[in-house]
Image (spheres, rainbow, N blue to C red):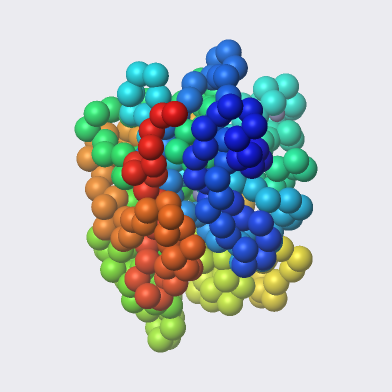
Amino acid sequence: MAVFDGRNGRSAMKAVVVHGVSDLRVDTVDEPGRCPPESVVVEVDYGGICGSDLHYVAHGAAGTSVLRHPMILGHELAGRIAATGEPVTVHPGTSCGECRYCRGKLAHLCERMRYLGSAAYDPHTDGGFVRRKIVPVNQIRPLPASVDLRSAAVCEPLGVAIHAVGRAGDLTGKSVLVNGAGPIGALVVAAARHAGAERVYAADIAEAPLRIAKALGAHETIDASTAAELPEVEVAFEASGSPAGLTNVIRWLPRRATLVQVGNLPAGGANVDLSPLISREISYLGSFRFDTEIADAVRLLADGLDVSPLLTHVFDVDEAEKAFAVARDRVGGAGKVLLDFTRERSSP
Ligand SMILES: [Zn+2]
Ligand SMILES: [Zn+2]
């Protein structure tokens, strides 16, 4: 992370930086320098705040990635190529192209994956919560003019949702439960509908996320804090990451059901009753990020998927701290919270 000191003759721009636990700042950093070959400068218009961004601020870690020095956050981006004005989103992952997973067309599981705004490696990979960001051309995904840039900021989490749906196999005609109706859960609802699920239930312990899930296509919503039982579905997606929520989902799954874990469970262990997995032969699958599905996400938006009910808040970059506080408060009605960089001076 290049802190601005003015000595290299470059201009400055704002960046949303996590310095440690509960220490989020809007810092001034250097504008990007000379663009390396096969890369472009992206002028970021909107950045979506993700659960992992919130985790870095709340705990100084996201899953097993522990923050060791300040890092620019952000991996859900939409903007324009600075030189041409072409609207784009960004695939946040840089895979090595050489490990067995890359060679096996599972690049998202790359052993040396670098991900924007991730502390998986030291030094960390700075994210895209800045006005101008150098991005390798092979991570650029052009957007059709019909997709507005606020909606396009959800291409990354929508890719996560489409990947999770793909892990469950063919959903055509199936009954589906999505447990946890935060941004990922709500997008899994939309992706499951698109994949042909016949009946999609969304469950959450708060009312506001259920309203969003309904707007994104859930046939029925369930208040998991009061419901006596969950519906018997063929496929369930656990998107809450709550051990109690997971235990409850497993408790109501019928025999031979498929359960996809897409919400991040607490690292270091959780108290979950997995015993029914055996006697009911439940297939329990993990789902991590996505590979090519960001292209499917762009296509879904281009085809008219309306994610606007999910986009509940937009904050100027200067209000990042407030934006993060709102994003944390799901019970209060926050869906996807966006940071707006468009008022940052666009070039030096
Ligand atoms: Zn994300
Ligand atoms: Zn690799």
Residue sitting farthest toward the top: 37
Residue at x-position 49% and y-position 40%: 13
Q: Going by the image, does 95 lie left or right of 157?
A: right
Residue 2 horizontal/vertical position (percent):
65, 38
Seen in the picture, residue 148 relative to 67 is either above or below; the reply is above
Seen in the picture, residue 341 relative to 239 is either above or below; the reply is above
Looking at the picture, tell me which residue is in the foreground, 162 or 229.
162
Q: Going by the image, does 14 lie left or right of 284?
A: left
Residue at x-position 73% and y-position 51%: 69
Q: Quadrant of the C terminus?
A: top left
What is the quadrant of residue 78 in the picture? top left
Looking at the picture, tell me which residue is in the foreground, 273 or 327.
327
What is the quadrant of residue 313 in the picture? bottom left
Residue at x-position 42% and y-position 51%: 317
Seen in the picture, residue 299 relative to 181 is either above or below; the reply is above
Split into quadrants, the picture shows ligand 2 in the one at: top right
What is the quadrant of residue 181 in the picture? bottom left
Q: Going by the image, does 207 lie left or right of 263?
A: left
Residue 298 horizontal/vertical position (percent):
36, 34
Residue 75 visible, this orientation: no
Residue 84 horizontal/vertical position (percent):
35, 18
Residue 63 horizontal/vertical position (percent):
68, 57
Residue at x-position 40% and y-position 86%: 226
Q: Quadrant of the N terminus?
A: top right
